[in-house]
Image (cartoon, helix red, strand yellow):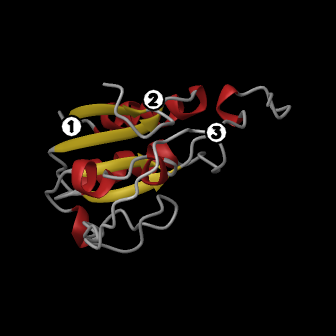
Amino acid sequence: MGNLGCGCQGSMAKVIERPANNESNNVKATSELAQWPVQLHLVPPTAPYFKNTDILVCADCVAFAMGSMHQDLLKGKALAIACPKLDDTTNYVEKLATIFSVNETPRVTVAIMEVPCCRGLDIMVKEAVQKSGRNIIVESVTIGIDGNRRN
């Protein structure tokens, strides 16, 4: 399995081996999502769910790679998802800066994958915080392609 031709290590096909789980578990995880929409292109900057609340800016792949994403990262936060590689990110810094400034955001968590192209989302959020003119706590979380937290 090699590079798919786009030059990004994050695009290489890879099998993630996991031990077989033969236990029957009928307990379903509860969604912690408390809003709609979630895509950064679609969220209105003045949506009531952003007002005075912590925000999770999350790379699209995190929710699929990390089985406990809702409980570990999303619980108690408003959400905006984005992909720095595939989205048109032209207005992301400006939109995030507006969200942070008009909603008095106290804290932002940025969750990205360990692949190089994902780092752009972390950079955009930090730039938006600076542009918002507010002193906001920013926590960056990196998730491995195996779904485990790297930091």
Q: Nearer the viewer, residue 148 or 85?
A: 148
Q: Earlier in the sequence, mark 1 or mark 2?
A: 2
Which residue lies at the image location 36% right of the left edge and 45% below the top edge?
97
Circle 3 packing at 10 Å, graded few (<14), some (14-19), many (20+), is: few
Give coordinates of residue 21: x percent, y percent: 40, 53
The CA span between labels 1 and 2 is 17 Å
Residue 118 percent location from the top left of the image: 53, 34
Quarter of the figure with residue 29: bottom left
| SS of the residue under disc 3 | loop
What is the spatial separation of the Cα atoms under label 3 and label 2, in whole angstroms? Answer: 29 Å
Identify the mark nearer the N-term, 3 or 1. 3
Nearest to viewer (mark 3 / mark 1)? 3
Q: Is residue 37 left or right of residue 130?
A: right
Q: Spatial distance from mark 3 to mark 1, Cα to Cα?
A: 43 Å
Position of residue 132 relative to residue 55, above or below, is: above
Work out whether 95 lies above or below 136. Answer: below
Residue under numbered circle 3: 15
- Where, quadrant-wise, is the N terminus in this rendering? top right
3 or 2: mark nearer the eye: 3
Q: Residue 64 in the image: x percent, y percent?
A: 48, 53
For residue 134, the mark is 1
Task: Tell me which residue sits at (28%, 41%) in the image.
Answer: 109
Q: Which residue is nearer to you in this view: 61 or 27?
A: 27
The circle drawn on residue 123 is 2
In the rendered view, tell whether residue 150 sits above or below residue 53.
above
